[in-house]
Image (spheres, rainbow, N blue to C red):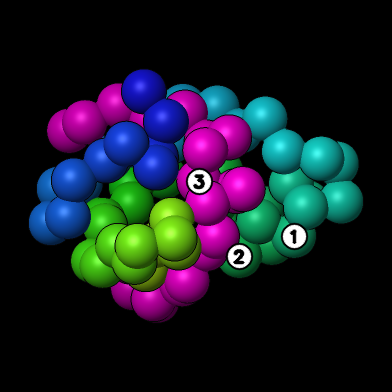
Amino acid sequence: MTLDKGSIGKIYVIEETALPAQLEKRMEALGMIKGTRVQLIHKKRRGTMVMMLRGTRFAVGHGVTSRIKVREV
C-alpha cells in the first residue's frame, strides 16, 4: 500500500520509494530510506500529511506520499 492510504496514529515501515532522483536523494538525506519506521500524525483534506520520522515531524504533499510504498507494523 502507499503512504497516502495510511491511517492516523499507525506506524508503517517504508518498503520502496518511486520518486524522481533528486527528490529521492533529498528524502534519503532526511532519513527516509527503506526499513525506516514512519508514524502518521495528521492528514489534511488535500492530501498533505504530517508524519513523524526518526523523532522529527515532516509535512509531505500528496504527490510524494502517493509514491512511497509501506507496510503496517
Disc sitting over residue 65 in the figure: 3
Q: Position of residue 43 (x, y in %)?
A: 30, 62
Is residue 31 in the magenta section? no
On residue 30, the disc is 2
Indicate which disc, 1 or 3, sits on the residue closer to the N terminus. Answer: 1
**Quadrant of the image occupied by residue 67:** top right
User: Looking at the image, is mark 1 or mark 3 nearer the viewer?
Assistant: 3
**Residue drawn at the location 42% of the way across and 30% of the way down:** 2
Question: Taking 12 as reference, is 7 left or right?
Answer: left
How much space separates mark 2 and mark 1, taking CA atoms? 7 Å
Q: Can you give x and y, in whole percent of width and height, for residue 16 in the image? A: 55, 27
Q: Residues within 10 Å of mark 1 (few under 14, many from 20)?
A: few
Residue 43: mark in rendering: none
Q: Are marks 2 and 1 in contact (CB under 8 Å)?
A: yes
Which amino acid, mark 3? Thr
**Looking at the image, which residue sits at the far left?**
9
Circle 1 sits on which residue?
A: 26
Rendering coords of residue 36 (x, y %) = 41, 45
Q: Residue at x 56, y 43 (%)?
A: 33
Identity of the amino acid at label 1? Arg
Specify the amino acid type for callout 2: Leu
Span colored in magenta: 52-73
Of 35 and 71, the residue lying toward us: 71
The reply to whether the C-beta atoms of the residues labelled 1 and 3 are less than 8 Å apart is no
Helix, strand or loop at label 2? It is loop
- Residue 68 falls left or right of residue 42: right
Dot in front, 3 or 2 = 3
- Element under label 3? helix
Q: Give above or below for 51 relative to 65.
A: below
Visible residue check, residue 16: yes
Frontmost residue, 24 versus 31? 24
Q: Quadrant of the N terminus?
A: top left
